[in-house]
Image (spheres, grey):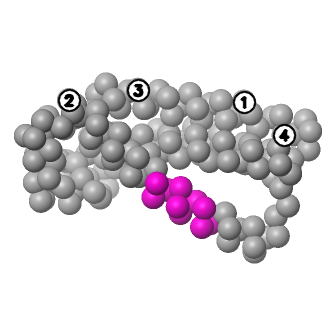
Amino acid sequence: RSYAIETSDGALDALRVAGVDSQGIFLGKSAALFVQLITLELLLFVLAVVLYQVQLSLAGLVLLVTCVLCATAGLAFVGTLYGGLTAGARGRETLLPLLLLPVVAPVVLSATRATESAFLSGGAVLADGWPWVGVLAVFAALFGIGGLLSFGALIEE
């Protein structure tokens, strides 16, 4: 959605003409999306704890926070990259979810399994969550690096 506003206002063109590095634009847009998602997740977490009276151990909380940070970073990088990809396309409101959903499926699955392990918080069950966090971290790193390398070509159009 931010790309539509920037495209109609000419802000993205102004950033390119001003000589702003494309990697800086990618990181800035990803960071803005990351902050928005973390804020929403924090509000939903507090609401869930109050409504469901969740009890988390310290180790479970560490696993949950690490999972949330890695998953959110991955979603922010992918959303920024694919948002830039579909910014100039006709029917982008329909195209973006169709392209994004299969790509973020590993994030959804991994985050679900890690969160399940964090809430169950039994010794062996808790240890089962860390490999899923590793998958989330690798996903975020791959799309972060891929976005940094390819974002310049996406916004050049």
Q: Earlier in the sequence, mark 4 or mark 3?
A: 4
Inter-mark Cα distance, 3 to 2: 14 Å
**According to the image, label 1 marks what residue?**
131
Nearer the observer: mark 3 or 2; the answer is 3
Disc 1: CA contacts within 10 A as few (<14), some (14-19) or many (>=20): few
Which portion, as a residue range, is magenta?
A: 35-44
Q: Amino acid at mark 2?
A: Ala
**According to the image, label 2 marks what residue?**
153
Q: Amino acid at mark 3?
A: Ile
Front in this rendered view, residue 8 or 56: 56
Report the quarter where the N terminus lies: bottom left
Task: Please say if 136 is above or below 13.
Answer: above
Inter-mark Cα distance, 1 to 2: 34 Å
Q: Residue at x 92, y 39 (%)?
A: 123
Instruction: Check whether the beta carbons of the residues at disc 3 and disc 1 lie within 8 A of each other.
Output: no
Q: Earlier in the sequence, mark 4 or mark 1?
A: 4
Inter-mark Cα distance, 4 to 3: 30 Å
Inter-mark Cα distance, 4 to 1: 10 Å
Q: Main secondary structure of the magenta part?
A: helix
x and y percent of residue 146 in the render?
A: 38, 27
Query: Is label 1 in a helix, a strand or a loop?
Result: helix
**Residue 113, picture quadrant:** top right
Task: Please say if 141 is above or below 71.
Answer: above
**According to the image, label 3 marks what residue?**
145
Front in this rendered view, residue 58 or 76: 58
Q: Which mark is residue 126?
A: 4
x and y percent of residue 132 in the render?
A: 69, 34
